[in-house]
Amino acid sequence: MLFFVVRREGETVATRENMGKAKSAKKDEFYTQLTDIEKELRHYRKHFQGKTVLCNCDDPFESNFFKYFALNFNRLGLKKLIATCYAGSPIANRQLSLFDVSGEQEDAYMAVVTQVRDTNGDGGVDMMDVAELFRAKENVLKKLKGDGDFRSPECLKLLNEADIVVTNPPFSLFREYVATLMDREKKFIIIGNVNAITYQEIFPLLRNNQMWIGPSIHSGDRAFYVPDDYPLEAAGCGIDELGRKYIRVKGVRWYTNLDIKQRHEELILAKRYKAEDYPKYVNYDAIEISSVSDIPCDYPNEMGVPITFLDKYNPEQFEILGISRELVRTVSEDVRKNGAYPQVGRFYLNVGTAKYKKVYERLVIRNRHPETPREGEKP
């Protein structure tokens, strides 16, 4: 029987020499829950018809990404589903013996699904039917020559074959993972930390509308399953009713370059600009917006907003001009003399009596279609 246990979906490693380091970096081993995958992927169904989907950080015996696409193979009209397994999966090796595929603990595996028999009449399969996937001659389960790393030659060859990549890549390798996808001009839906928005390798892609934030996660935390030996020391950890360990992680987002209608919904702006309500930075000519809901509808010039603005970003409504880290290369003399630990790359506000307050990382935006100011008001 084929089991779907979520354990090591994000444990891809660079090389065998890095295996020990990767195993010690337990915070990189988060496994996405099926409910979170379903909530996001329902927005992309039209994109999957006739496509080859690659889950290249996903053990086919354990990953909920693979499970989602296997269960919905016919409903989505997929052409092919490919998943690659990390080296050293104990569950994979146990299950492979049922299909006359032998291997060692250090081996990595791949699964290729090209046909799923529709047994319930609605284009999908039941959980018990998934057990028969690899008994069908049309589907393939075999060992890889390498360790299953997404950068290995054979995994890159599979990437070249794919139309869409969907997975939870290792957070610590997020920059390199995205660079690999962009280099090969692949469509993707992946999950990562919200702070990736500020990475110098990632932000230009967001600014230039080469990738954007998915619609289903805009706030709060999410539960991720972790390996059995993961220490439950932080707040929010626990064990569910099935005995699986999990932790709750704040600040995660879906990242994609597949167009969706939510990306073009206009943000409703309820406030108007008043100079006394919107202070300017002392070291950059822009007003401070501490909350996205405070963006004025009639201000035509530059505004500094939190990075979570990207959750509501409509490229037809706003233009992203830059990020504070790149725009502010020097600290003004006033801040240098009177600010506490002045930091280059951050905006400062004058809070009175020669004191200056540093604000968090800000995106700088401009409203493409500001409303006309009311009589007597000046932007």
Image: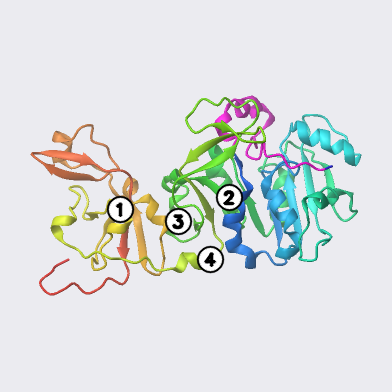
Q: CA distance from mark 4 to mark 3?
A: 15 Å
Q: Earlier in the sequence, mark 2 or mark 4?
A: 2
Residue density around tag 2, few if under 14, some if 14–19, many if 20 or more, within 10 Å = some
Q: Earlier in the sequence, mark 1 or mark 3?
A: 3
Residue density around tag 1, few if under 14, some if 14–19, many if 20 or more, within 10 Å = few
What's drawn in magenta, residue-wise?
Answer: 2-30
Q: CA distance from mark 1 to mark 3?
A: 20 Å
Placement of the C terminus among the 4 image quadrants: bottom left
Q: Nearer the viewer, residue 262 or 140?
A: 262
Q: Quadrant of residue 3?
A: top right
Amino acid carrying mark 2 in the image:
Asp
Q: CA distance from mark 2 to mark 1?
A: 26 Å
Observer-side mark, 2 or 1, equals 2
Amino acid carrying mark 4 in the image:
Ile
Question: Is residue 9 located in the magenta-colored stretch of the structure?
Answer: yes
CB atoms of marks 2 and 4 within 8 Å: no
- In the rendered structure, the answer to whether residue 140 lies left or right of residue 293 reads right
Which label belongs to residue 260?
Answer: 4
Q: Which residue is mark 3?
A: 206
Question: Is residue 37 located in the magenta-colored stretch of the structure?
Answer: no
Which label belongs to residue 36?
Answer: 2
